[in-house]
Image: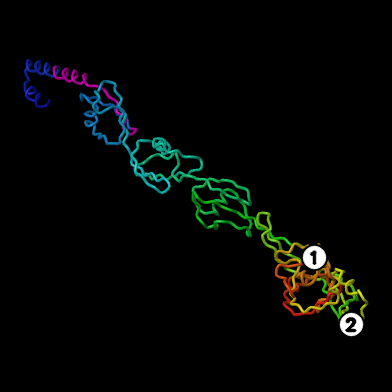
Amino acid sequence: MQKILKPLLAVKTKSGYSVFTAIVVTLFSTWVIFDATKAEVVIAADGDVQVVKTHTTTVGELLEEVGIQVGEYDELSHAENAEVFDGMKIDFDTAKEVQLTVDGETDVHNTTAETVGEFLQDTDLNISEHDELSPSNLTVIKDGLEIKVDKAFEVLVNDGGKEKKYWTTGGTVEELLEENDVSYEEEYKIKPDLDEKVTKDTEISIIHVEKEPLEIEESIPFDTEEKEDASLEKGTTKTISEGTEGKVLKIYEITKENGKEVERELIKEEVKEESKNKVVAVGTKEVQQKANTTSKKGSSSKSSSKESSASNDGKVFTVEATAYSSDCSGCSGITATGINIKQSPTPKVISVDPNVIPLGSRVWVEGYGEAIAGDTGGAIKGNRIDVLVSNDSKARNWGRKTVQVKILN
């Protein structure tokens, strides 16, 4: 403009001023007309608003004119090839790069969202009240922001037999129990261990352990003590004094898990009353038997017609003797002849082979005394007997012996 006006300024005549004035007016009018034809556009870029007048025809040309470059992930309210018109408003947001880590897996995202909450909505990532999010939903998005999400999962806890599920995003067993106010005693058993990490497959078991004392009074069985008596015929016995059971107080420590007994330990034993043995006199006096050499006519036929178990009376056998108790494996407690061998005091009973010693016979056993042949046994064959004693310990002490047995009747 100055170049155009310079030669005109050199004309100082009246006519020259007239020409100058005409030219200025023409130029100004042209400029006014040119400026009036521009479109007025409002551009809101990343929160900054500016009004621009332009003769550009497209949005892309206009943004280039004002120095705005549109990236792949930027958000633009109009297409770049859209035609510019007067009064147009263009919104432009520059995308920011964020790192999103979900349960340890990281992805890079470009977003134009203003806050973390809006960004998560755009990614269709559902966040529950149990999940852990850092930073919070209200945090403003900045370029390079790191967002971490730990998704919650349920863990089953069996607390003393009662099951309940708790939400967690990880940590140790101890931390999960503390966060959910699950209390436990030091002596309780907890599986897995408190310092173990919990996963989606973890199941926690809390076993309630209780220990309490238990007092039980039990009877002490008495033994039978035999004393030889020369005044009694061999094979006969006589009770001198009856036996009496004693009493013992046993104190146990009972261990219970979830209310059920799992262990019983004897911690103290106190004898309240001693047992007294039964004392039996065993005859040792030998008796001579006279042979009957006289017989009357027809007496042999008469005696042979009699059939009785008494034909074995006085017969003496040498047998191999073992012992058993009512608690033996396979024992029912009732003998072959119906005797209850679990009664107290323990009855004097022997098991026999009925082909050798008739069942129901009253017998005398060397080292055992008078008894009833009241039982049988699968291993008792021939000259073998099994004597009944009060417990397994005495049966073991008896062992295996060779003894004399006499049938009394």
**Percent position of residue 118, x then y:** 41, 35
Q: Quadrant of the N terminus?
A: top left
Res. 269 in view: no
Q: Image height check: is 375 above or below 71?
A: below
* Circle 1 Cα neighbour tier, 10 Å, few/some/many (<14 / 14–19 / ≥20): many
Colouring chosen for the image of the structure: rainbow
Q: Is residue 42 part of the magenta span, yes or no?
A: yes
Is 320 left or right of 160, judged from the image as shown? right
**Percent position of residue 165, x then y:** 56, 45
Mark number displayed over residue 236: none
In the rendered structure, which amino acid carries the disc numbered 1? Ile
Residue at 76%, 77% (x, y): give it: 319
Pick the front one: 340 or 384: 384
> Which of the two discs, 2 and 1, labels the residue nearer the N terminus?
2
Is 356 left or right of 285, judged from the image as shown? left
Residue at 9%, 27% (x, y): give it: 3
Q: Looking at this view, name the residue that lies furthest to the right.
A: 296
Pick the front one: 307 or 13: 307
Q: How many marks?
A: 2
Mark number displayed over residue 341: 1
Closer to viewer: mark 2 or mark 1: 2
Is 311 left or right of 182, judged from the image as shown? right
Residue at 34%, 43% (x, y): give it: 108
* Circle 2 Cα neighbour tier, 10 Å, few/some/many (<14 / 14–19 / ≥20): few
Q: Image height check: is 358 above or below 59?
A: below
In the rendered structure, which amino acid carries the disc numbered 2? Ala
Q: Is residue 249 part of the magenta span, yes or no?
A: no
Pick the front one: 370 or 362: 362
Q: Which residue lies under the disc numbered 2?
A: 291
Magenta residues (range):
26-47
